Amino acid sequence: MAGSFHSVSFQVKIAQGLKAVPAAGWDACAVAAGSGDDDPFNPFVSHAFLSALEDSGCVAPETGWMPVHALVEDRTGRLVGAAPCYLKSHSMGEYVFDHSWADAYTRAGGRYYPKLQVAVPFTPVTGPRLLVPNGPQAAGIRSHLISGLRALRDQAGASSIHATFLQRTDLEAFTGQGFLQRDDQQFHWFNEGYGSFEDFLEALASRKRKAIRRERRDALADGIAIEWVTGGDITEAHWDAFFAFYMDTGSRKWGRPYLNRQFFSLIGERMAERILLVMAKREGRYIAGAINFIGERRLYGRNWGCIEEHPFLHFEVCYYQAIEFAIARGLDRVEAGAQGEHKLARGYRPVITSSAHDLADPSLRRAVQAYLEQERLYVAEANDELTEAAPFRRNRDKD
C-alpha cells in the first residue's frame, strides 16, 4: 500500500516500513515529541526499537502487523512529523481490548478487520504517538497526521483507527478531531526523592514494610543472587538465557509469545545502553530475568520469565529491583506494564491510561461511545478507591 495526501504547506506520506525512513529524521521527531510530565526520551518510539520489530519479522504482514507509518513533510521534503501505524488483521498484542467490538460488528454483518493501529506493538507504555516536535506549527502538523490517518483508513478499507497509550497532548489532538476516549489503569512507582530502598520502605505503613522485607528475604532464600546487566555488558549468552525465560512464561500465559530471538539480538546491537536486564542466578546458572528499558526519567519494565519457580522471585526481579535501579539512577518513575492490582501492595500507585478510537460506521460508533462513557466512570471510581488503599503511611499511622 502506498499513498500521499497533500495540503498547501505539508504533505502526508505513507511508509511501508522504517527502512524507508532515515533514523535521524524519525528520532528528531520522536525525541522532541514529549510534553509536560512525559519522559523526554521514550525508547519505544525510537527508530532503533521499532525497526528491530520489523527487521526481526515480529512485525510484518505475516504476523498481522503491516507497517503503514504516516509521515508529514514540509515543502522542502524535511520530515516534520510521524506516527507509527499498522494495518491489522486481528486485535492481538495491543493491551487495549476491542474483541467485543469486533464480535458485535461481525454479528451485525460488518467487517471489523482490517483496522489501523497507531501504537507501539506489544508494548503497553504511554508515550508520544503523534511524533511532532514542539513549536508554533505543532498543532497543525498533528492535525495533518490525523487527517492522513483517516484518508489511509478510507483507502485501505479499514473499519477504524485506534491510537493507544496516549500522552495528554496527543489525546487532546485526537479527541479534538472527534475520536472517542477510552480509559484504563496501570500501576506505577513514583520516586519521592528516596535515597535508598530503605527510605522508600519508611514511607510505607509498618505492616506493608515488614511484608516487603519478608518477601525480599524469601525470594533469595535458595541461594539466588541478582545481577544488573546493561550496555556493553549484555552478551548473546544473556539473550539466550533471557529468551528461554521469555518463551517459557509467554507460552504458558498467552500461547504464542510475540517476540522472537532475533529481536533481542537487534535491540542489543542498537540500543544496549537503554536496556537493563535483571537476572537471577542460582548454582551457577541463570534461572529468571526481566527486561527493562531506560528512558530519560523513567524505567519501563517489560517482559519477565523463569525456568524455576521460587516464592516471591517475580516480585523481587520485576518490582523491587526496578525500584532499586530507579533510585540509584535518579529516575522519577517505574512503569511496570499492564494490569496487576498486586502491584499496589508493593508500593506502586494506580494511574489512568488513555486511548482514542475512530469508528467509520455511525452505528458502531454510537454503541461504542455509550459503552465508553460508562467505562470511564467505572475506571475513575476504581482509580480513586485504589489510591485510597495505597500502602503509604498516613498521619494516623502508629509504627
Image: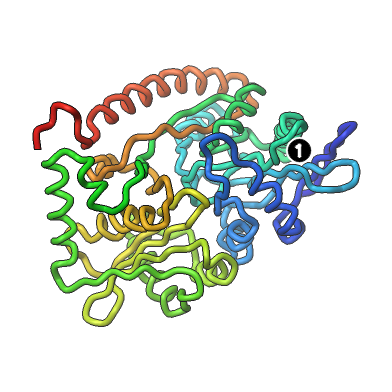
User: Which residue is identified by label 1?
Assistant: 155
Q: Residue drawn at (53%, 44%), measured in percent from left and top?
A: 39
In the figure, residue 148 lies in which quadrant?
A: top right
Horizontal side of 14 relative to 377 (left or right) equals right
Horizontal side of 131 relative to 274 (left or right) equals right
- The secondary element bearing badge 1 is classed as helix
Q: Callout 1, which amino acid? A: Gln
Q: Nearer the viewer, residue 336 or 104?
A: 336
Q: Nearer the viewer, residue 393 or 66?
A: 393
Q: Is residue 117 visible?
A: no
Q: Nearer the viewer, residue 105 or 231?
A: 231
Residue 93 at x, y = what percent?
48, 49
Q: Nearer the viewer, residue 87 or 77?
A: 77
Q: Residue drawn at (75%, 58%), measured in percent from left and top?
A: 22
Would you call the spot at circle 1 few (<14 residues within 10 Å), some (14-19), or many (20 or more)?
few
Residue 183 at x, y = what percent?
45, 29
Q: Is residue 362 above or below residue 140?
A: above
Q: Quadrant of the C terminus?
A: top left
Q: Residue drawn at (16%, 55%), measured in percent from left and top?
A: 215
Q: Is residue 322 above or below residue 243?
A: above
Q: Is residue 389 above or below residue 38?
A: above
